[in-house]
Each structure stands twice: as C-alpha cells, then as structure tokens.
Amino acid sequence: MADNICSGNGAVSLFEGFMDAFVDASDLVDYFKAVWYPRIGVWIAASKTLPLASHETCAAMEFYHRQLKLRLLNEKDTEVYRRADWLVHKLGTKVHAYFWLDEYSEKEHFARYKKEEWKSGLNSWRKSLTIPDSDVSIEGRCAKVTSQLDRDKVHVVWNPGSQFALCDCSWSEMGNLCEHVLKVMKVCRDKGSNDEMSVSMSKFRRALIGTLHYPPHDSLARDHAVSLALFVQMQLSPAISSKEQVPSGV
C-alpha cells in the first residue's frame, strides 16, 4: 500500500482495503481511524510529491545520528552541556571527526582509535552486504534470514522486497533499519521477484523528467540541470529497459 502511494499509483481506496484486511484487529483499526484518517489527504500528497532518500542513505543517516547521541551521552565532562557553543564545538570537532575516522580504511593505524568508545562498526546497509545470499530464503509472504552472530537463530522479515518491510529482530522492533530487511530487498531485486523500481528511484526519475519538461528560468542553471538530467537518464534507460524485457516468472 505504502509503495503504491509513494510511487503515485494509489489513493484513498487503498486505505479502505487496508481497513478491511485488518477488520479483526479492533485496536489497530480504532487507532488508524483516530490518528491517520484525518491526515490521509496530507499524507498521500506528501508521499507523492516529496523526495525519498534511498535505504543506503537512510541507514547512514540513522547510524550517524545514533553515534552522535551515544558519544555525546558518554561525555564525562558535563560542563559541555551548559553552553550551546561548547556543545556545537564538541559535535563539530571531536565527535564528528571520530565518526568519519571510522570510515577510513587505515583507521587501525591510529593509536587513539583503539579506544572502545569510538569504535562504531558498520551501519545496517554495510552489514547487509556481508550476509551471503545462501542465508536468505523467501517463503510466500515472508523471508527468513539466518543470524550472522548465532547460526541457530533465524530472523523473519514480513512483506519482503518492499521498502516498508518489517523484521522481528530487536533492532528493527525499535524502529530502526536492520540489515535483514535490506538484504532481503537486495535478494528480491537480484532475483527479479520485485520488478518495480524502488520508491526513491521512481521519485528521482520523475524529478529528472520534470527538469527536462520544465527547466529553470536561469540560463546557466537550466543548461546545467538539463545536461545533468539527460546524462542520468541515459545511464538509467538501459537498466530500466533490460528489466522490462525480462519475461515474468524468470
């Protein structure tokens, strides 16, 4: 439902079907009617028009925010919280610098980096790249992913292939993007079980087409925008056309 609305292919009728599907869950239906029914029009309009970042970008932003919060809360000098300029200085120098040091391939050569408080590891997107395809199995409307930490444990992902999939792992249940959902999305797209473009790619393509049809008034900005849009469209067209030519069921 959310995929269709964000892609511009759905409307209020999808919500009615959603309500019918969950008619037995009275608490959910009551909550939905009380909170979301009055905002459906605004939500649909925003979902259709506003840009949507890719999951790779969302995972990086989520991870960055979490690391900032953790490192700030671990600050031993409580005086840093007393003044806004001290807080900004702390975030912009020490905390921010150590976050980007984590991305540096030669980071282990820095003696100060070995302090455990600064080690952050990989974000959810990068963790998903370490999961082998053999650890993912899709069974009907759900997928199962073998845990990389405990091989005897299996995580279940509902609505596989969708950008709005859910996982039963603790990280996902806290409202975060987990590596299991991201891995299942990649597997579904590689196998061709999800023929539609991602919502973020669909919105990006629509923005490019809009730039070509309605270029900016400023001549310099117009020339740059149109040339960039044409270049990206040329890069996307072969991938999109080849995907459309793949027979269904392959």
Image: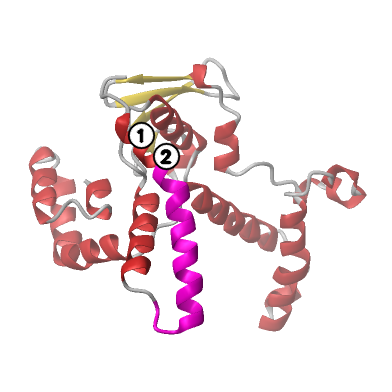
Q: Is residue 234 magenta?
A: yes
Instruction: Give the residue drawn at x 26%, y 61%.
Output: 48
Examine the image and state in which quarter residue 49 appears: bottom left
At label 1, the amino acid type is Lys
Q: Position of residue 131 (x, y in %)?
A: 56, 26
Which residue, given by chain and number where applicable, does mark 2 sit on? 239
Please tell me how crowded label 1 is: few (under 14), some (14-19), or many (20+) other residues with Cα within 10 Å. some
User: Which of the two residues, 172 or 248, is positioned nearer the viewer here?
Assistant: 248
Instruction: Give the residue drawn at x 75%, y 46%.
Output: 119
- Residues at badges 1 and 2 in contact (C-beta under 8 Å)? yes
At label 2, the amino acid type is Ala
Q: Position of residue 75 (x, y in %)?
A: 74, 63
Please tell me how crowded label 2 is: few (under 14), some (14-19), or many (20+) other residues with Cα within 10 Å. few
Instruction: Give the residue drawn at x 41%, y 34%.
Output: 185
Image quadrant containing the C terminus: top left
Instruction: Give the residue drawn at x 38%, y 61%.
Output: 208
| Mark number, residue 243 | 1
What segment carries the magenta color?
Answer: 216-239
Examine the image and state in which quarter residue 165 appears: top left
Q: Position of residue 33 (x, y in %)?
A: 13, 57
| Residue 176 in view | no
Q: Is residue 163 magenta?
A: no
Q: Position of residue 124 (x, y in %)?
A: 55, 41
